Image: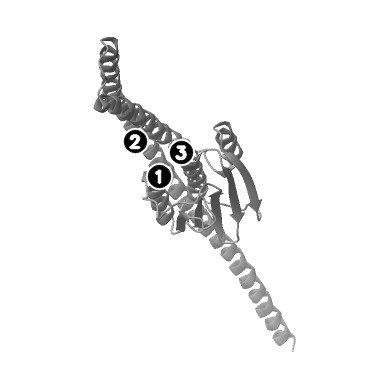
Amino acid sequence: MRTDRGWRRFYATGWLVSAAATAVALRLWQSRVREIEARAEEAVRSREEVARRRAVEERLRIARELHDSLTHSISVIKVQAGVAAHLAEKRGEEVPASLRAIVEASADATRELRSTLSALREQADTGSGLAQLPQLLDRARAGGVEVTLNRTGTRGDIPASVDLAAYRIVQEALTNVRRHAGSVPTTVCVSYLPRSLTVRVENDGPRLAGSPVPGLGLIGMRERVTALGGHLRAEPRETGGFSVLAELPLDAVS
């Protein structure tokens, strides 16, 4: 009897020891798995950081190349055309319309090129995002745009690519308002949803006749949104003005 009881105690003790050893081994295994996963995630982040840094360096290189070549050439054209127009006026001759067109076109091209170069340099700033939206709106107001900002929902964890895309869309939309509509009431709405981020920019400009031809700004917006798996709708409003609506999924790869 005592022998049976002893064996039962022995077996029970063995099971307890085995269970404890299994629990310890399981914890060690889980800890090892978490360590491996953390290393893998760190490696991915490192590769992404290297890729972003190389992209920034390439943008800056392109900006420098464009500045050194195109800006100088266009400036020379503008100066030469301006001198020719000035000499013609000084001699009392009528300045040809084509010469005036060259002066105006070169001035416009210079402004557009500088704007493009500025955008390329700004893209090198990885800090750009919706957190800088108030400063962007202040600059738009300083440029004459009557803009107000409305936010709905609670901001959560937004991928960096989505955050930057939303900022750029608002930036380009406000640039188009200033360029095509001037000082008109404009509203920027940012909606934080559980699985997506929605950005809407609307202005109360005049009613547009027909569908506008998409410019490089709208094309760039659409490409940016499509790359993130989102949707963009840019169209004239029935009551006048223009509306830009971008829906960006939050599960986009940053």
Residue at image mark 3? 179
Q: Residue at x 69, y 83 (%)?
A: 8
Residue at image mark 1? 217
Q: Is residue 237 left or right of residue 64?
A: right
Callout 2: few (<14), some (14-19), or many (20+) C-alpha neighbours within 10 Å?
Answer: some
Instruction: Single out the mark in the foreground, 1 or 2.
Output: 1
User: What amino acid is labelled 3 in the image?
Assistant: Arg
Q: Which mark is residue 58?
A: 2
Quadrant assignment for the N terminus = bottom right
Q: Residue at x 45, y 56 (%)?
A: 232
Q: Is residue 6 left or right of residue 44?
A: right
User: What amino acid is labelled 2 in the image?
Assistant: Glu
Q: What is the image's colouring?
A: one colour
Q: Quadrant of residue 145?
A: top right
Callout 3: few (<14), some (14-19), or many (20+) C-alpha neighbours within 10 Å?
Answer: few
> Which circle's residue, 3 or 1, is located before the other in the chain?
3
Does the CB distance between marks 1 and 2 fall below 8 Å? no
| SS for dot 3 | helix
